[in-house]
Image: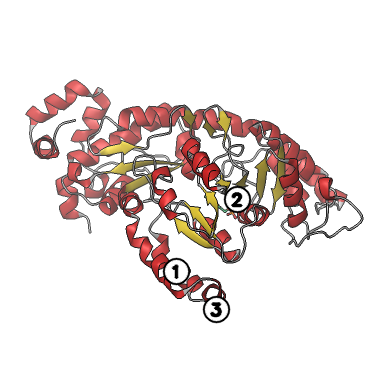
Amino acid sequence: MKKPLTRRGFIRNAAAGSAALTWLGAHHPPQAFAAEAAKPALLGGTPVHQGGWSEWPKWLESWEPAVLKVLRSGRWYRGDGGHVAEFEAGYAKLLGAKRCLATASGTTALLVALHVMDVDAGDEVIVSPYTFVATYNAILINKALPVFADTDPATLTIDPASIESRITDRTRAILPVHIYGMPCDMDPIDAIARKHKLAVIEDACQAWLAEYKSQKCGTLGDLACFSFQNSKHIPSGEGGAVTGNSDELLDRCHAFHNVGRATGTFKGAKPYFTRGGNYRMQQFQAVILMQQFEKLVRETARRRENADYLSTHLKEIPGIQPARLPENSRAVWHLYPFRYDAQYFSGLTREKFLKALAAEGIPCSGGYHEQYFDGLLDEAINSRGFKRLFSAERLKAYRESFQDLKGNRHVCATTVALSQNLLLADRRDMDHIVEAVRKIQSHGAALAKAVA
Ligand SMILES: Cc1ncc(COP(=O)(O)O)c(C=O)c1O
C-alpha cells in the first residue's frame, strides 16, 4: 500500500483534477468512476442507493397455522417440552451439538451457563469488552467481575494474547464473544483455559451457524449461548439457547432454568437438588423458530456471498480495512464491520463519514462504544455486594484497568458497521455500498468542511 501522505495528496487531486480521475478510471469499473465524480448526497447530490433495504424480521403466511395451533391448544408453557423440545433437537442438529436447551433469551442463557460452570459470587470472568452490554450484565448479575481482555483491532474479537496476564486466583471462566457472527480464535483460548483449568463459555448470541475450523460456534467451549431476539438472524421476539456436548452439563442447565427441578442424570428421589430460576421458553417461540431453520441456512449463504464480495472490493479502497477472520473460519455477519482510517479521507472524521454514508442511502453505525465508561460497572463495583466480595485494592485496580484496553478503544473509535439485512440484497446493491464509500473519499475534504 502507498504511504498515507502520497494517498492524501492523490485524493485531494482526485476531487479536483481530471488527471487523477483518469488514473482512477483505469483501476475501477465505469459506474464507480461516475459515482465518484458525482456530488455527495450531503452536499446536495443524488444518493448512490435509493429504494431502501429489506425489512427485518420477515415471516411467511405459511407459518401461521403452526402458531395458531399452539394458540388454540391452550398449551402455551413449556412443561415437559412439546414444541420447545422439538426445537431443541432441531437446533442441536443444525449446529452439530449434542444438546440444546431453549431459554427465554440470550441473557438468561448466559445466566444459566455461568451458574452451571460454577461462576459464583466473588469470582472473575475474562471476557471480550467488544460486545453487547448483556454479556457484561450476565456476569455482574452472578456477582462476579467481568475482567476485560483486549480486542484485536484486526479481528474485532478477543485478543488471545491479552488473556493470560489477566488471570488471577479468582478467575473461573473465559467468555469469548463471537461478535457480529465472527468466530473468535478458539484454539489459543482453549489452550489457556486448559492450562489454568478454566471453563470456556462462548457468547454465540450473534453467531448462528458461524464456523471455526469446520466446527460450528456453539460447539467449541464447555457451553455456548445464543439469542433469538427480534433483530437476530433466527428471531422469535425474545428467546435463547444454551448448547453443548455434555449431557451432565446440559441436565444441570435444564434443572437451573426450570426452578431447580431434576432432569436426566439428576432425576432421583429428590426433585429439587439445586437452586434455579424460571428461564423457560414458551411454545409460541419454539414454533416460530422451527419455521426458520431452512431460511437461516439459505440467508446465511447469501450474507456470506455478499460479505465476501464487499470485503474484496472495500479492501481495495485505501483507509478501509474489512475484519480479518481466524484461519479456516466462516462468519455469519450479524453486522458487517470495517475499520475506517480518516487519514485516507482527507481527515473526515468517522462520525462525519457515518453521516455521509447514511445520506448516500447506506444505513450504518459506529458499532459498540467503550461501554465500561458508561457507569454500569461503577454502579456495580460501588454496590454493597461487590464491596463485600472484593477488596478495595482489587476494585480500584479493576477500574483503572479499563484504560489499558487500547485495542478496544481503537476499534470503538474506528469501526463502521452495516446491519445484516443489507447483506440480503442484490450484488448491484453491494456495488452501491462500495461506490458510496469511494464517492465520500473523493469528496472527503469538502465533506470535512461542510458537515457539522
Ligand atoms: C453478543 C450478545 N450477547 C448477549 C445478548 C443477549 O441476548 P438477549 O437480548 O436475547 O437477552 C445479545 C443480544 O443482543 C448479544 O448480541
Q: Nearer the viewer, residue 220 or 69?
A: 220
Q: Nearer the viewer, residue 180 or 98?
A: 98
Label 2 CB-ligand 1 distance < 8 A: yes
Quarter where residue 297 is shown: top right
- Residue 103, position as x, y percentages in the image: 70, 51
Q: Secondary structure at mark 2?
A: loop
Amino acid carrying label 1: it is Arg
Q: Which residue is mark 3?
A: 384
Quarter where residue 144 is shown: bottom right
Q: Which mark is residue 394?
A: 1
Q: Earlier in the sequence, mark 2 or mark 1?
A: 2
Q: Which mark is residue 308?
A: none
Q: Secondary structure at mark 3?
A: helix
Amino acid carrying label 3: it is Arg
- Residue 58, position as x, y percentages in the image: 60, 41
Q: In the visual, does 364 lie left or right of 185?
A: left
Query: Compared with residue 375, is residue 411 higher up or lower down, i.e. above or below?
Result: above
- Pointer 3 local density, CA inside 10 Å: few below 14, some 14–19, many at least 20: few
Residue at left offset 54%, top offset 40% = 207
Q: Secondary structure at mark 1?
A: helix
Q: Which residue is mark 2?
A: 229
Query: Compared with residue 392, is residue 324 higher up or lower down, i.e. above or below?
Result: above
Q: Earlier in the sequence, mark 2 or mark 3?
A: 2
Query: Compared with residue 6, is residue 163 higher up or lower down, i.e. above or below?
Result: below
Amino acid carrying label 2: it is Gln
Q: In the visual, does 121 lie left or right of 291?
A: left
Q: Earlier in the sequence, mark 3 or mark 1?
A: 3
Q: Quadrant of the C terminus?
A: bottom left
Label 1 CB-ligand 1 distance < 8 A: no
Is residue 165 in view? yes
